[in-house]
């Protein structure tokens, strides 16, 4: 028989406790990782479905049985994605796994991911049936307004005859403000841009503002802007306005001096909203145009990034660069599939949808396209 003294027993107990704790820690890590993997898979699927609809409807792509696009599908995929992020069970489980892991340094990446899930889901949580109903109703009106805006007949009436309507996107109208030599044409283009405001007001924008504010108040915020600022920045709109007020007050003398100098050089009419961009640009845009041809924009962007040793690591870029009827009138870059590394170390390259609104025939289009590419694709 082997006689166990008290010292041996203490060592045996300590060793057993360490092994038990190690086993428990491993189990907690495995469970947390399995939870994160499941959330990642679910979100990736729903996010991609929404982004595909976002791209198809914003670009006014043709809907087919194989690749259907519609405002209804945009709304439903958005609702499904947000329903996942608003699922109280996911938020509850994320908090439980986060608490179980504690501050273990070996799981820092996992802990950060859980913190992100908790933060994100907290922004989407709709604790009451009333809040959820308001959000769904808002999404429907938002989708209808976006569709109406995309289909809006925009342009300007030719001041030469007061009758001929030149159909043109908001990008084309802004280009007229910068480059048209006749003030009457610039003013007509400005009035064309201004028509967007009354149009959206008459097509649901006011209702959207009311519903958004109602939702925010249902959730305990002052209004929708206060809610979005708090979720994004961690402080409310009151604090933000204090920051912005200081910025405005500090830069106001520069702005006033610039306006005085512009009027001094070009006359008081230069301060009219349809004249400012033209007077400030002068002939520089036309002089620069030969050096930035539109056909070279993508090549110049690619060469610039290659020279900076930027490697996209197998990413796929879907480009839609030209302005056309019914296309969404703003450049953007979205990621249906973000770049990320799976827990097993597998690299998932990103898939990117990028759009700009260039008119190859317009003066300055090449520089605008290059600027947009450099800005949007930098991420």
Image: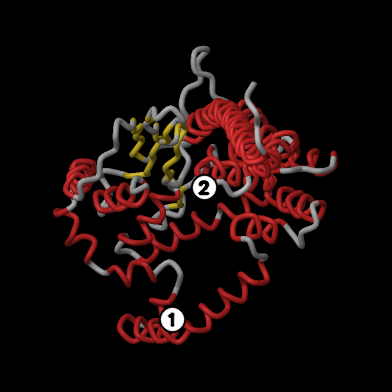
Q: Residue furthest top?
A: 65
The kind of secondary structure element at disc 2 is helix
* Mark 1 burial class by Cα count in 10 Å: few <14, some 14-19, many 20+: few
Q: Residue furthest left?
A: 291
| Displayed quadrant of residue 161 | bottom left
Residue 94, how many percent across, how many down? 67, 39
Q: Quadrant of the N terminus?
A: top right
Task: Give the side of residue 52 with respect to residue 291, left or right.
Answer: right
Report which residue position mark 2 lands on: 105
Residue 153, how many percent across, how many down? 52, 42
The residue sitting at 22% across, 67% down in the picture is 283
**Which badge, 2 or 1, is on the more N-terminal residue?**
2
* Mark 2 burial class by Cα count in 10 Å: few <14, some 14-19, many 20+: few
Q: Which mark is residue 131?
A: none
Q: Is residue 205 above or below residue 340?
A: below
| Displayed quadrant of residue 11 | top right
The kind of secondary structure element at disc 1 is helix
The residue sitting at 46% across, 30% down in the picture is 343
Report which residue position mark 1 lands on: 255
Asked if one can make out residue 39 in the rendered structure from this viewpoint, the answer is no
Which mark's residue is nearer the viewer, 2 or 1?
Answer: 2
Residue 4, how many percent across, how many down? 65, 32
Q: Name the foreground residue: 107 vs 233.
A: 107
């Amino acid at each position: 028989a082997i006689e166990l003294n008290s010292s041996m027993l203490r060592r045996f107990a300590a060793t057993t406790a360490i092994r038990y704790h190690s086993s428990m820690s491993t189990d907690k890590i495995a469970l947390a990782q399995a939870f994160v993997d499941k959330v990642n898979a679910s979100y990736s699927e729903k996010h991609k479905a929404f982004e595909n609809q976002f791209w198809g409807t914003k670009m006014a792509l043709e809907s087919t049985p194989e690749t259907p696009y519609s405002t209804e599908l945009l709304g439903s995929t958005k609702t499904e994605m947000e329903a996942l992020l608003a699922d109280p069970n996911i938020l509850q489980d994320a908090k439980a796994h986060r608490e179980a892991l504690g501050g273990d340094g070996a799981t820092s990446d996992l802990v950060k991911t859980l913190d992100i899930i908790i933060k994100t889901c907290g922004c989407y949580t709709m604790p009451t049936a009333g809040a959820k109903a308001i959000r769904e109703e808002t999404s429907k009106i938002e989708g209808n307004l976006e569709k109406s805006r995309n289909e809006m007949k925009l342009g300007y009436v030719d001041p030469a005859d007061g009758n001929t309507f030149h159909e043109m996107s908001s990008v084309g109208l802004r280009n007229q403000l910068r480059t048209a030599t006749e003030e009457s044409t610039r003013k007509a283009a400005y009035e064309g841009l201004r028509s967007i405001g009354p149009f959206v007001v008459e097509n649901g924008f006011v209702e959207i503002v009311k519903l958004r504010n109602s939702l925010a108040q249902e959730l305990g915020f002052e209004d929708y802007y206060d809610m979005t600022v708090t979720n994004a920045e961690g402080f409310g709109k009151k604090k933000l306005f204090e920051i912005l007020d200081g910025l405005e007050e500090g830069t106001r003398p520069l702005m006033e001096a610039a306006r005085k100098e512009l009027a001094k050089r070009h006359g008081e009419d230069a301060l009219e909203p349809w004249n400012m961009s033209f007077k400030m640009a002068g002939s520089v845009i036309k002089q620069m145009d030969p050096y930035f041809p539109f056909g070279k924009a993508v090549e110049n962007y690619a060469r610039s990034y290659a020279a900076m040793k930027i490697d996209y690591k197998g990413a796929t870029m879907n480009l839609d660069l030209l302005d056309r009827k019914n296309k969404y009138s703003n450049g953007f870059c979205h990621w249906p599939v973000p770049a990320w590394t799976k827990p097993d170390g597998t690299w998932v390259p990103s898939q990117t949808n990028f759009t700009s609104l260039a008119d190859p025939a317009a003066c300055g289009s090449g520089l605008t396209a290059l600027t947009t590419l450099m800005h949007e694709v930098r991420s």
